[in-house]
Amino acid sequence: MNKKGQVTIFIIIGIVIVVGIILLFMFVGDFDVESPADLGPQAFVDKCVKDAVEVSVAKMLFNGGEIVPSHAIAYDGDEWNYLCYQADFYKGCYNIHPMLEMQIEAEIVRDTQDEVQECFNTMRIDFEDRGFDVGGGPTEYSVNLLPEMVQISLSKRIDVSKEGASQSFGNFDTEILTPIYELVQISMDVVNAESQYCNFEYNGYMLLYPKYDIRRIDYSNSKIYRLVDRRSGAEFRFAVRSCAFAPGM
Amino acid sequence: MDNRKIIAGFELTLMLVSLFAFSYGVALTDDAFGASMKQYEDGADERAGFFGKLVGGIIARLRAPMIPVVSAAGTGIGCCEVAVNGEICGSATAGNCEDGVGFVDGADCAATSFCKKGCCINEAAGTYVPNVKESHCDVDWVADPNCNMPAAQEACCIVGTESYYETRGACDVRGTNGAIVEWKSDMNVLECLGAAETQVTGACVTAGNSCKFGTAEECASLSGEFHPDVLCTADGLNTSCVKTEQTTCVDGKDGVYFLDSCGNAANIYDSSKVDDDSYWENVKTDGLCGDSSGSANSASCGNCDRFAGGICASASENSFTVDSGDSFCRDTSCMFDGVKYKPGESWCVYDGKIGDGDDVVGSRHWKYVCNQGDVNVEPCADYRNQICTQSNTMDIGAGEVDFRNAACVANNWRECIALNNEEGGKEVCEETLNCRIEHVDIADKFKFDICTPRYPGGSSFTDKRYQATAKSTCAMADQTCTVIYKQTMTGSCVCDTNCACEESGFAIGMNDMCRKLGDCGGEVNIAGKFTENYKVVNSPMLSADSVSTLVAMATAVPGQFAEVEDYDDYLAAAGLFGGPGPAPEDAEGPADHSNIMLGLNVGMAGILLAGFKLGWFAPATLGAPGMGAITGTGGALAGYGGMAASAIAGAIGAVVGILLAKALGLSPVGTALMSVGASMVSVALIGEYTTLVASLGGLFWPVLIIGIVLMIAALFFGMGDCDPVEVVFTCSPWQPPVGAADCELCNGDPLKPCSEYRCKSLGAACELLNKGTDNELCIDGNPNDATPPVISPQFGVISDNEVYSGDSASGVSITSVDGSNGGCIAAHTELLFGINTDEPAICTFDLAMTEFGETSETEIYKDDYYDYNHTVSFALPDPSNGESRGLNWTGDLKIYTRCHDQKGHTTPGFYTIDLCVVQGPDVTGPLVKRFVPGNDGLVSFDATSQDVEVYVNEDAVDCKWDTTDMDYSLMENDFDCSPNIAGLYGSSTKCVATMPVSGVTSDFFVRCEDQGFLDAVGRGDERNANAESFVYRLRKPEKKLEVDWIEPSQDFEVNTNFATVDFQIMTSGGGEWHHCSYSFDSFDNLADTLFQTGAERPHRWPMNWRVGDHKIYVECKDETGDTARGTTEFRIIKDSSTPQIARIWQSGGSFNIITTENAECKYDTAHCRFNWTTGQSAGTGKEHSFGVTRGETYYVKCEDEFGNVPSGCSIEARAL
């Protein structure tokens, strides 16, 4: 067979294939390329929730463990949340956020629960746009500060179905790596020492634990603390007013 | 000993010591002042000695704006749960407290139910938080602010190759993410620090020839085969891991480590070993590369030691070139001022000379720290509320090594000042940390000791509250030295006593005392600028040389630092506050030479006369001077019969001469001449013109003329008095130099950041910009100001019955509101008035036109601080007082005012305040202003009498009292009224009396009469006595103060090293306020740990005491000064023993264990370091049992109810 003949045959075959495909679309109509099992909602929720929690953790670090500082001193254009406060001179402070770790966990949940719900909503809309029926149960959401991480416990039953095929998802637990647990523990050491001894020997502490950089600024009868994890650069900021001295007799 | 441990141990020790020192210092500052305040209140009877009296008034003035003192009863200040400004559990008045929240007048918040501190507990998380208010705790709360409970005790938590010193609960949390943790309850923090490093590590070979380097526990969790001390690259393991040239830093370790191809850290980086296969076989701990600097900045060796000077860091990030890999030992030492400091070393830096009271104004103590190669500053508290102490060596047991360490510790300068008000304070001062005795020794009768701080505190230049107290503090150095002069025989005056007060040493000595009290007097700032702030009357001011000496103090002394004190001694010594030193002897008044000379002269006159009359001398009569000599002379004359009459005539003449000489104020010589001359004239005249005595015949004229000549000559011998000279020193709060030339000196040094105090000390016009940022700058606050302040009346401020009128640019008048008496104001009125300036200024108010800087005796008031408002209050004089005495006192007053602003611009002329005081006879009686003790005051239960002081608003007053109301003239008991505070301004009288007290109440009636000076001129009937009595009442307690009981009184057990004890004292009787103090030493040292509990009974105080024997001495005092004492003895016993295995046996397939005490036992089959939470339970109680498998070894741990658990196993047993 000569070459021209071969080429002609190939061209005809190609035309037939193309026409066949066109006819297929024209006469057969829509068809699915996805099944519920292919959706992978965990990855979507994981990223979405992590993004929300990371922002919230950053807020906690910046605002001394609260979404918005509740009792703070203004310094350098920011509000520095008091973790320990004594209004009088010469007296040790009251530890006003004793369960800081639990408080931060609650604050993160409070700060992100709408966003977490929105993650599911966004996912549901996306799935529905793609022709899936999506159903679900209540959301159980909590966070837990642990060494070197924030553990996110997220349970929600998600039922995805399409044309008889269905899939259920329930566990969306995830975690983000952050030294907030360690920094909070150090802050509690600081506060405990300030409340009992009116001082925290942070330079000695840094010598023992060189992976943390602790900075203190004395300002307006208060002490501004910055606890920095040298490796990640994460910084926990707060203020203390303890055993303040009067500027005179 | 391992160097690293030594250093770490030292750091920890110092940290703890400094913490303790600080807290103790603060506590002492608080309580000490509270104590001193109270002791002052307790009455004048306790105040003795020169300085007790001197400072008493000062302390009283300091009281109101002072530290919130617990015993604030009656002041309306107490503990407020929530103040209107949102502050929680602070001192406030009831009015500043939110409605409906807790408030207890006079109480310290720690003692109230609503602000009591406790321990907030989250057992699951192992969190035990001290000093928490109950309402702040959402979980469990117990009333133990120190969290003295077993589970709150921290010990060592080992996680892999890292260790943490924390509670067991917190340690367990670390295991929740799968990490293997080990809890070692019997390790202290130092042991814990090195515990992780002692963990055995090695290669963990897992399936597929993979290898992970770690601990045995970690390997067990990976189900791998553990090869201790072997690296993953070891030949014999046949793993896939091989050596590389890469290096890494490892968490929790200092060094640089080689990295194998599997990502495992191998041995310490040593570039010479890169290709040395043997270096990749086993874990090497000996023969490593390195040097004494911790391999700092070594390109070839990674044996870093952060304590010696190096710590692992990224080479690329630090632009460092290494032989292999990307990590190196970054140099963590520091260079400062040419001195190399080791990592972790800290040292003190100062702004000038320190100590001995020489710290200059605006100065601060700085602690610098070498932190991982950077010099960081840790400023000690401003206003020198903290001082920086330093030690250059540390004792490591086997000797001392060089290691600098600094700490900011509380400066107890307030206590030093307060000691001046206490009996025995000098001795206490000498023993009190950082207090010193200032020996003021200026003249023979002007010498005393005063307790001053070694490091004087600073004071705000802007806060009015502290300006007022600074003024009071400085005023302690307001002193008057009375220089006594005596007459010579010729009548001239020569200095006799305190002569040195008129010399330059007076200003130097007094200014030293003044400036050592704080920011007072003639002193320099950190820029070396001197301002005066003192006045000296009748003595030279400071010389230029003296000022230069002060200026030199603004330069730091090389090598000088405050040494770390022995705080144990401090604890022992501190506490009893008293006044310094012996009271100086009272300056003797001028000897009454005139009386002696008078008698001598008269005697001589009689002798001369008699001898003259007889023609001979009678020396036998010289023996007795004075009028006795006259008598003697007369007696001698009588022996000569007819000559007696002549002698008497001569004596009469002599007496007349003496009276005349006295009236003329002649000197002794003048008096003698006058008396002799007069006696001669008398004899001559009486003999010539009477028959009483024989005529002198031809001697008449010579005798008469000589007599007259002598009398005339006498007039030339001393017509004046030798008045004492009062040398006055006035000490005022320090003021910054005018202008803003030096403001910039505060900026630019990041290691000495500027502050409000520092900035304002550099210039009156300096202002701190960008406050509350990390870029605070000290600048000229008003660079465009080129004009002096403009003065106007302070229209809002004037006493009730007066009004401003005739306001103009040059002045204003003040008249009475009703316009009676021509608008003149009644005498003795407490006139309140003031002026405003359009910019902050310092103003003077004077009755004469006095320039700034000139000394004036007519000055009414001078500002101590720059302000817009200048308010003056003073009592108007009573012109009749002067007029009644024939003095030229007038009711017209002109007050000349002048002001200058912060730039030094002075008002061009005087602003004049015109007023007049009603002239005319005084027809009203005096007014009693105040009683001490106050009316209706309590006195001691045992008192039978009470010294009472009465202050009356006029001078020259006499007062009387009686127990029934009656007319002044009928009252039988006199007050002893002080010599009038003479003068035109602010006259008043203090009268004292001792009144009998009996029964629960004693009432007295007091009346006074004014113008006592009228008696001397025969116009006593013009005096005005009170028509009505002032009723004064004193009360006694119904029962004497007693200490009923003290708790604890019996031994008790705890399970921690410290016990929070509810220390209680029950008192009864006495006054309303009982203030208790205690000591571990004796009743002589009570105030060092003082607390005051006010009116509540029993007195409770949560204390944090160490286990051991305790004997507590308690003394309670009420407001009358009555005291009651008690003691209690007890032992706090610690149960720290771990449960012991009394017996173990196997019975069939079970182990049975009996423990010596109730315990919870758990076991594991792998090792003793099992996680407590994952261990298998063997039961609780004393009997324990669990099933076993033959041949298996069981590791058992038992923990008692106090949390005591052995660090290893309680027992290991193999099942048979």
Image (cartoon, rainbow, N blue to C red):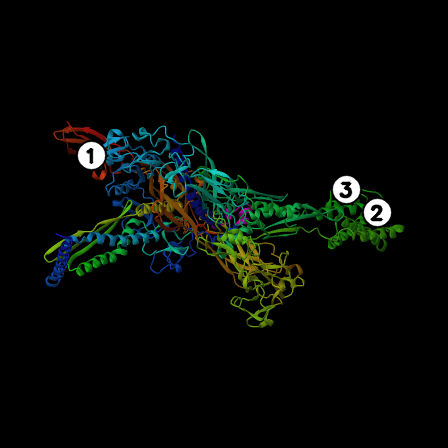
Q: Sequence-wise, which precedes: disc 3 or disc 2?
A: 2
Q: Nearer the viewer, mark 2 or mark 1?
A: 1
Question: Which element carries disc 2, helix, strand or loop?
Answer: helix
Question: Which element carries disc 3, helix, strand or loop?
Answer: helix
Determine crowd level at label 3: few under 14, some 14-19, many 20+ residues with C-alpha closer than 10 A. Answer: many
Q: Nearer the viewer, mark 1 or mark 3?
A: 1
Query: What residue did someone put label 3 on?
Result: B621
Query: What residue did someone put label 1 on?
Result: B1164
| Chain for numbered disc 1 | B
Inter-mark Cα distance, 3 to 2: 16 Å
Question: Which residue range is magenta in the image?
Answer: B41-55
At which x and y percent is residue B692?
82, 53
Where B240 sits versus B741, above or below? Answer: above
In this rendering, position of residue A3 left or right of residue B505: left
Where B669 sits versus B824, above or below? Answer: above
In this rendering, position of residue B440 left or right of residue B1045: right
At which x and y percent is residue B127?
29, 45
| Chain for numbered disc 3 | B
Image label count: 3
- The front one of B670 and B503 is B503
Query: What residue did someone put label 2 on?
Result: B613
